[in-house]
Every structure is written in C-alpha cells, then in structure tokens.
Amino acid sequence: MKLFARDALLPKGWAHDVVVEVGADGSIAAVDVALAAPVDAERAQGPLVPGMPNVHSHAFQRALAGLTERGGPSGDNFWAWRRQMYRFLERIGPEEQEAVATQLYLELLKGGYTGVGEFHYLHHDPAGRPYANPLEMAERIRAAAAATGIGLTLLPVFYAHSDFGGAPPLPTQRRFIHDTDAFLRLVAALAHTEGERLGIAPHSLRAVLPGELAELIAFARTELAGGPIHIHVAEQRGEVEACVLWSGARPVEWLLANAPVDPHWCIVHATHMTPEETRKLAATGAVVGLCPSTEADLGDGVFPTGTFLAAGGHLGIGGDSHVGVDPFLELRLVETVQRLTLQQRNVLARDGESNGLTLYQTALAGGARALARPVGAIAPGLRADLLVLNGDDPALTGHAAQDVLDAAIFGPGRNIVRDVMVAGRWVIGEGHHADEEAILVRYRQALKRLFA
C-alpha cells in the first residue's frame, strides 16, 4: 500500500508531500518526498509521525488505578501502595489478566503507543502454584496483544527474594517466585511468535542475588539472540539505603560495577543517582525507562534528565502502573518536572529547536532500542508503526507542522491521535478500534469479579 501525507516527521525532521510505501511484510519499503499524491495512495488526514514505544508495562495494574487514593494516619508512600497492590492481585486469574491487558493495550494504541514492553511477573495462581500450563499468564498477555494489534516485547520477570542479600520472599509475593532453573525453562518454552520480541527481566537488585543475575544475563546473551534485559533500579530512596547497607554501594553504582550493562539493557526508573552514576550510566548506551505519571503517582522522585541527556544518555517512556496511557502526557511530565525543580522553561530543548520535537524523537529512539524492535522512524526497512495526528483537535488546529508536537505535548489536547498503524495494518481508525465495544464489555465483567 501507499500512504500520502501532506506533512510527515522523517529522521531529519518535518517533510512535506511525502509518500510512504508499505510492503506486504509490514515494513516500510520506500519513502519519497515532494511528490504529488499517487492516485492509488491513501491520504493521511493529518500530520504523520512514528508510533511511540512504551518501554515498561505491568498490565494487570491498570485495574488498580484509582483504588489507592486514601490518606493514612502517617502519610502514604510507595511501600504502602505496594502492600495494597499485593492484596489486589490475589484475585486476578487468567481471564482477568487477559481482559485487563486487552483493555489497556487498546487504550495505549488510542493514545499513540504502537509497541509495549510487558514486564510480566504475575506467573502463578493465587496460592503460588504453577498453572497446569506454566505459560498460562504469559499466553494471556500475548492474546491481549494479538487481539488489539499492538506490537509486543515480552519480558518475563525473574523474582526470587524480598530484599537485598537473598531475604526469603514474602507470602504476598508467592505468585511471582521462581528459582533460576524453573524460570529459564519458562523463558525457553516461550517460543518465538511472529512480530514479537522476547527479552528477560531480573526484577530488581532486591529480588535477585548476584549469582542469579549473572546466570540470567548469560542465558539472555546465548539463548535470546540479543533480546533486551530490563531491570528496576534505584526507584526509591529506601531502596538506595538498603542497597548501601547490603553491599556498600548504591544500586546503579553496584550494577555498573558488577554487570555488563550495554545498549541491550533498559534501566527502569533510575530515579536516585549521583552525578557520577548518571554520567557512567549514560556512557553504557543503556536506555533509561522513565514512567513519569507513575513515578509522580508513587512519589518516587525526579530523574536527572538534563544531566543524563547532556552526557549522551538514551531515554524511553513507559506506563508502568498505567495511571496514564498517553505518551504526550508522559513527555510533558518529563519536561515539566524539570521546570519545577530548576525553575526554568524549555529545560530539555536544544537551542532554537522545538522542545516537543526533541522530546518525541529522543523517546522514539530510546524506545526502539529498549524494545529491540525495528521501529522509531519513518524510514525504509523499519516497521510501519505510524500515527496520523488529529488536526481537528482544537489543540492542534492551525499549527504548522514544525509546531504540532509542541502543541500535542504541551497544549490542552485530549484527542491527539486519529489513526494508528502497526506493522502496516490500521488498528485504530478515526479514534476507534473495530473490537473496542466487545473489549470493554469483557473488561467490565472482569472488574465486577475483581471488585465483588
């Protein structure tokens, strides 16, 4: 197929009168500029941009949003939220997992995400026993991705301990727990499926002993053909303090000294770093996965984005617990928390350049690397993951192409995305998915069971 766009965001910036040819395999075969619209081409009804990768997702937590907003007698924090989350997941079975993930992935697509890295750690039944099919819960994630059409990087999570130094897991963590042999059998059994990438995710330095981490890394290098490695690191100050007590080093400091961190890695959050850690992490080529709406919701803290980018670091954005499902909002928060901290404006913009364009292209490149997917730009050989922005939204109306991402990210728009293509197939048209009503019915039924 051919797609004609009056304005399209190409790797070197905005171009006008662009024809994108998409092959039968879902990849971009050719991009031509300054051409009249071919008679056989579809016309994009708005500016054309690459779809955004979402680098970090816990799909089941979508159903928890809005259920933890009660003050406590001595305040609230991440650890109190985690206790509530553990109680909530006791009721989630395979049907609920699939229904919630399908609704979430639909919402992500509508928001402008075309791929998702599912940090999947809900492996066992509520009693902590493997299902008859040990892949049951992972296959429900795959079914949700297939039903909606979103691109999937599946990241099975290894979780063995409750705290640094190999502390025994808590009873409330029993649905996550594996030893390394059982976990690696599970990963090996997750045979490749068309269009999917498979990686591996040691949950955190709290949950994995050094020897276990080394074994997981060796497996990923030899058996997953360069699949990505994702890990939570330094999200909370309490985590940093506990890591120092255990090892004498801060989490990022310990990881860089003891693991071969490289561009295959995605370090999720990395909120609390020293300037030296920030520069050293940037130098590895690893992607930092920021989840600003969740990090704000949980009171994590503020990532040193300006210092990290100035050192050549790579960033992607994610949804984590999915209190937000909008990549434009996440990018706004990346910038605005810096403004609040530094009391400046346009902190992350390069001199004279569009802040929105800089943020969007930074997250595209980092997201593509973190998910190990050939996406992130409108260029031959990459997957045709594309968004048509909604020029009818009042926030975008009248804006020239060079300003449209500033308007989308920093303006008041609520319906920014009109159409969404994933791997050459339209999955959202005029803001709607063909199966959205049935997906919502199933989601509502799942919530009735969860909230009963």
Image: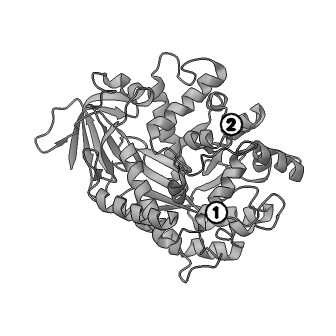
In the drawing, does residue 62 fall left or right of residue 215? Answer: left
Residue 452: where, in percent of width, then height? 50, 66
Q: Earlier in the sequence, mark 2 or mark 1?
A: 1
Quadrant housing residue 6: top left
Circle 2 packing at 10 Å, graded few (<14), some (14-19), many (20+), is some
| Residue nearest the viewer, comparing 243 with 379 | 243
Alpha carbon separation for disc pair 2 and 1: 25 Å
Q: Position of residue 13 (x, y in %)?
A: 38, 28
When the figure is inspected, residue 375 is found, relative to residue 128, above or below; the finding is: above
Looking at this view, name the residue that lies furthest to the bottom: 132
Judge left or right: residue 17 versus residue 319: left
State the mark number for residue 405: none
Q: Nearer the viewer, residue 102 or 38?
A: 102
Identify the residue at image location x=31%, y=49%: 421
Q: Is residue 382 visible?
A: no
List x then y, in percent, for residue 368.
49, 47
Which of the two marks, 2 or 1, is nearer to us in this view? 1
Q: Which residue is mark 1?
A: 87
Residue annotated with mark 2: 301
Q: How would you rate the neighbour count of disc 1 (Cα within 10 Å): few for under 14, some for 14-19, many for 20 or more?
A: few
Q: Residue 216 sits in which quadrant?
A: bottom right
